[in-house]
């Protein structure tokens, strides 16, 4: 049998196996090599909340999806072309995500009686044998025994041998998609520098997998995906949490201030704590606090001392920080609160994504407590918005909420990273020392943007007190005066609203600046909306897309921009939150599209939902 | 940082006291705010004694910060002419930790009460002691919630009749000093509002200690819990019911110094100094001895109807040892990180692996 070489514009591969099968690493390594070849790409890791759910069971399945191509790739792919399953549970959990006619690469060893039982297939049923997969191209590969065979002459234990089997699959996929094994070999040699026998074993199995593809003659096709037409420059691959870390570190360098990061571990935010704790040489202090409240409180203490105070969490932890965020609003200190959202309420689905904390960010504190809200739209954009969160907090002496989510946090994309010189300086205004001044120091004296100066301990002659009690403007003295309270509430809001003068105007991402339909998104839905709108436009529809990075305050021109369209549609991974803010603020009958399944929008479902809204509208107009 | 440091001030020559610290008076630490505690509140004298010792702690005013939570005591920072923050309920230790870790040169004081530190903020209280952050914590203990108008507190003895416990409280109270020992605190002391001289001494000792200094101050709430500590504060009963600790001195108390504490193995007993026992037989106070300090924290009977206590309540420094502080550890680790690799943002942004698109 000869193998046909075929060119593909885009491909989606999903690696699925048991939590212990190393699917995340396999996916990442395939991603890295694919990035090096110049493809555009997006990834979506999905793993159980349990560290090691019972092996072989459906809840224990861990997957990694990669969408890559020679065209613009903005999502991890709705459905996959290739599904790699290391056991029967992985097949059961993921088959619905494979397109009809797609390829299944199944590790036959994972379909023995024991595994079928664990995956809860009925007695005597094996999907590889009962014809239920007839509409797919199934390649049965005995990965486990070929791995064992390849390592038969080593002294590795049974367990060590078994751990190498993901490299066989990786090697095979490298062959199928014409990718070199060398970058992975380099990686393995570095990773197992101190255990050369493990490195050698992995490399050996990787090559065995590759050669198996070449010689087994069971695969009818081999695919090539050409380089994508990316903007020229130097790229790296990056996840959202990684680029959040870099944005914060960049802010220390561009403000000249040290950064204090108080955090309590929580999924999916913990990687930011892990990442930052490795960058102490940049003037970063990380503090793993005893709880969420201590995490934010310590950041406020550091901010009082003149450092960039940052805390991070996810929804449940943000709820705990509420009172302290109110304190920062009241004190008018800079504070950055990173919320890497996950499906809620309560503990919800910790490893699943959602955008349902927007109203919490907006209103989730006692009293009138306005904060700035920013939201990154892609893994690489997390860098920009983390930097922006710091800039706004420091330059406007205000707490800023940064809304990322699990999808952005763990997803990755190629990033044309900036250089230090391309980044704006962040300017802070410290109150200077005063000597022998008879004038009392006024900590709440404001500039034309309602911003007070940063009056930090250690500065001579400006000793003063701040607190959570309502204060008199100017002096900061405790005040229960009714008129003063109303004035201060309005002032704190005006100060937040004034930030609108210092953020970019809202732009149209694609499409005409006015027209029939505008799809307005925020945060992590960017890729899906961009792709869906792009496809509808190619089909001849008059439709535009705008995507918000700044939600509180909104960009100054947002109302005008929205009024330029007949219909405004707001897709969100929640039950309708931005859409309420838009309706409330502008009295525009914006239409929601909501998905609340712990997963991002698929392009097709988004297109369908948009068309559905428009056809309903049509019907109403006609009748 | 564009802040002015101690050395700047020294260079500018406005320092005229010892070590470049101006000769402050207690008045220099009094802010322009009217003090608004109830007339006769124990907080007044504590404020006064703190203002009295501030000139002697050897720190420039600009480097002193008072941080409080919520409660009557928490108003304290407003009355000190230093930097101050009146924060949120129970969280002062966490805020102080963030401040001290980022600005280790500051002298940071936490003002807290029994509700603030032992109920809503108990977690932060023990974590602070465990970490041994170099701050001073003044725990105003009045065994009642004052600001919320008279509910029993986590240090109120069982059976306390209060607004929320009309039939008597059922909760077993915290022993704050034993809790501090349990959290591996490095400085554990007790004072009272009614003995200002001793309180001053304890404040100075707290200030001198490197690490978290936990000073419990028994404070009378004249409105909701008047006389809770009368057995200890009343001049007549005080010699009988309290014992003042001095490092290296035998534990003697009593109206005529006629009683002492003796250790029979690890069992403490009260003995009459007579022909049978002399001073030489007594337990000698050793602030560095954890076992002995632990025994002293257990002398915690609650006076009922002025009844005589089996063991006197100890006042003074029960425990004072050195242990590396958290803030120092952070400073060292950050400095080592800087020594290992110079910050290079471009290299960091570039990461380990890149590719060119042309």
Image (tube, rainbow, N blue to C red):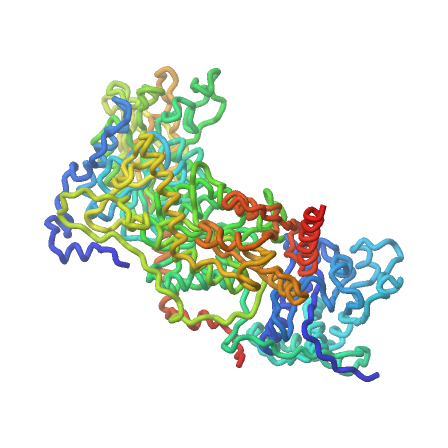
- Please tell me which residue lies in front, A575 or A215: A575
Q: Is residue B174 above or below residue A596?
A: above
Q: Which of the 4 image quarters holds residue A197? A: bottom right
Q: How many marks?
A: 0
| Residue A222, visible in the rendered structure | yes
Q: Residue at x 84, y 66 (%)?
A: A135
- Please tell me which residue lies in front, B61 or A145: B61
Q: Residue at x 36, y 16 (%)?
A: B307
Q: Is residue A424 above or below residue A564?
A: below
Q: Which of the 4 image quarters holds residue A485? A: top left
Q: Quadrant of the N terminus of chain B?
A: bottom left
Q: Position of residue A456 (x, y in %)?
A: 28, 50
Please state if A188 lies on the left or on the right of A283 as rendered.
right
Find the residue positioned furthest to the front. A622
Please state if B115 lies on the left or on the right of B234 as rendered.
right
- Please tell me which residue lies in front, B20 or B194: B20
Q: Position of residue A7 (x, y in %)?
A: 71, 79
Q: Position of residue B107 (x, y in %)?
A: 27, 47
């Amino acid at each position: 049998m000869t193998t046909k070489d075929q060119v593909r514009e885009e491909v989606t591969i999903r690696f699925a196996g048991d939590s212990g099968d190393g699917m995340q690493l396999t996916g990442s390594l395939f991603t890295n090599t694919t990035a090096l070849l110049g493809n555009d790409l997006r990834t979506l890791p999905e793993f159980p909340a349990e560290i090691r759910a019972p092996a072989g069971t459906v809840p224990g399945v861990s997957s990694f999806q990669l969408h890559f191509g020679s065209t613009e790739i903005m999502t991890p792919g709705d459905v996959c072309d290739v599904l790699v399953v290391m056991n029967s549970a992985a097949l059961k959990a993921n088959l619905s995500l494979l397109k009809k006619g797609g390829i299944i690469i199944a590790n036959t060893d994972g379909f023995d009686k024991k595994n079928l039982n664990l995956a809860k297939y009925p007695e005597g049923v094996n999907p590889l044998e009962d014809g239920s997969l007839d509409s797919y191209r199934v390649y049965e590969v005995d990965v486990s025994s070929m791995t064992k065979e390849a390592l038969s002459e080593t002294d590795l234990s049974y367990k060590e041998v078994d751990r190498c089997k993901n490299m066989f699959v990786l090697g095979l996929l490298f062959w199928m998609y014409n990718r070199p094994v060398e970058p992975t070999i380099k990686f393995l040699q570095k990773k197992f520098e101190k255990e050369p026998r493990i490195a050698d074993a992995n490399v050996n199995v990787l090559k065995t997998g590759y050669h198996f593809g070449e010689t087994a003659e069971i695969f009818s096709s081999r695919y090539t995906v050409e380089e994508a037409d990316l903007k020229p420059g130097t790229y790296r691959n990056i996840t959202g949490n990684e680029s959040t870390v870099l944005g914060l570190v960049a802010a220390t360098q561009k403000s000249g201030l040290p950064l204090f990061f108080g955090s309590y571990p929580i999924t999916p935010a913990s990687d930011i704590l892990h990442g930052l704790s490795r960058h102490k040489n940049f003037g970063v202090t990380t503090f793993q606090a005893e709880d969420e409240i201590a995490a934010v409180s310590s950041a406020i203490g550091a901010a009082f001392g003149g450092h960039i105070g940052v805390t991070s969490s996810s929804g449940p932890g943000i709820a705990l920080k509420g009172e302290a965020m109110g304190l920062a609003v009241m004190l008018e200190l800079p504070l950055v609160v990173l919320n890497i959202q996950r499906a809620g309420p309560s503990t919800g689905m910790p490893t699943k994504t959602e955008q349902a904390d927007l109203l919490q960010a907006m209103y989730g504190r006692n009293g009138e407590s306005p904060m700035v809200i920013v939201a990154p739209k892609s893994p690489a954009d997390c860098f920009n918005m983390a930097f922006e969160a710091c800039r706004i907090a420091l330059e406007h002496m205000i707490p800023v909420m940064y809304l990322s989510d699990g999808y952005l946090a763990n997803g990755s994309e190629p990033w044309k990273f900036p250089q230090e010189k391309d980044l704006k300086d962040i300017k802070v205004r410290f109150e200077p020392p005063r000597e022998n001044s008879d004038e009392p120091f006024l900590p709440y004296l404001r500039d034309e943007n309602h911003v007070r100066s940063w009056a930090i301990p250690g500065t001579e002659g400006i000793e003063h007190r701040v607190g959570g009690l309502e204060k008199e403007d100017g002096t900061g003295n405790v005040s229960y005066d009714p008129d003063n309270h109303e004035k201060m509430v309005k002032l704190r809001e005006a100060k937040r609203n004034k930030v609108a003068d210092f953020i970019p105007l809202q732009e149209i991402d694609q499409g005409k600046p006015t027209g029939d339909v505008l799809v307005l998104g925020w945060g992590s839905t960017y890729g899906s909306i961009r792709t869906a709108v792009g496809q509808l436009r190619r089909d001849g529809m008059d439709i535009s897309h705008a995507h918000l990075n700044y939600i509180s305050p909104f960009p100054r021109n947002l109302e005008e921009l929205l009024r330029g369209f007949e219909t405004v549609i707001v897709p969100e991974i929640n039950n309708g939150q931005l859409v309420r803010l838009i309706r409330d603020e502008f009295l525009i009958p914006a239409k929601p599209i909501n998905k609340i399944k712990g997963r991002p929008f698929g392009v097709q479902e988004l297109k369908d939902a948009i068309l559905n809204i428009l056809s309903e509208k049509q019907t109403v107009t006609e009748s | 940082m564009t802040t002015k440091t101690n050395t700047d001030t020294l260079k500018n020559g406005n320092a005229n006291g010892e070590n470049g610290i101006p000769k402050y008076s207690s008045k220099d630490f009094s802010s322009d705010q009217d003090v608004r505690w109830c007339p006769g509140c124990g907080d007044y004298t504590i404020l006064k004694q703190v203002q009295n010792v501030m000139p002697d702690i050897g720190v420039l005013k600009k480097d002193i910060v008072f941080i409080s939570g919520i409660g009557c005591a928490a108003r304290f920072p407003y009355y000190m002419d230093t930097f101050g923050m009146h924060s949120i309920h129970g969280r002062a230790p966490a805020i102080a930790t963030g401040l001290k870790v980022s600005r280790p040169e500051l002298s940071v004081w936490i003002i807290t009460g029994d509700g603030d530190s032992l109920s809503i903020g108990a977690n932060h209280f023990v974590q602070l002691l465990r970490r041994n952050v170099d701050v001073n914590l003044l725990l105003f203990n009045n065994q009642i919630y004052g600001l919320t108008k008279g509910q029993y507190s986590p240090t109120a003895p069982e059976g306390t009749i209060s607004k929320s416990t009309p039939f008597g409280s059922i909760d077993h109270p915290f022993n704050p000093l034993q809790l501090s020992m349990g959290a591996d605190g490095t400085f554990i002391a007790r004072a009272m509002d009614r003995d200002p001289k001793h309180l001053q001494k304890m404040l100075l000792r707290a200030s001198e200690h490197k690490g978290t200094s936990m000073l419990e101050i028994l404070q009378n709430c004249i409105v909701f819990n008047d006389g809770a500590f009368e057995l200890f504060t009343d001049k007549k009963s005080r010699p009988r019911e309290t014992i003042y600790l001095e490092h290296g001195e035998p534990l003697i108390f009593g109206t005529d110094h006629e009683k002492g504490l003796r250790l029979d193995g690890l069992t403490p007993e009260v003995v009459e100094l007579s022909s049978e026992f002399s001073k030489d037989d007594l337990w000698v106070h050793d602030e560095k001895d954890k076992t002995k300090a632990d025994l002293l924290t257990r002398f915690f009977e609650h006076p009922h109807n002025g009844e005589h206590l089996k063991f006197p309540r100890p006042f003074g420094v029960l425990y004072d040892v050195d242990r590396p502080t958290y803030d120092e550890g952070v400073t060292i680790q950050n400095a080592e990180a800087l020594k290992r690799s110079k910050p290079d943002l471009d290299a960091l942004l570039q990461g380990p692996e890149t590719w060119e698109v042309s």
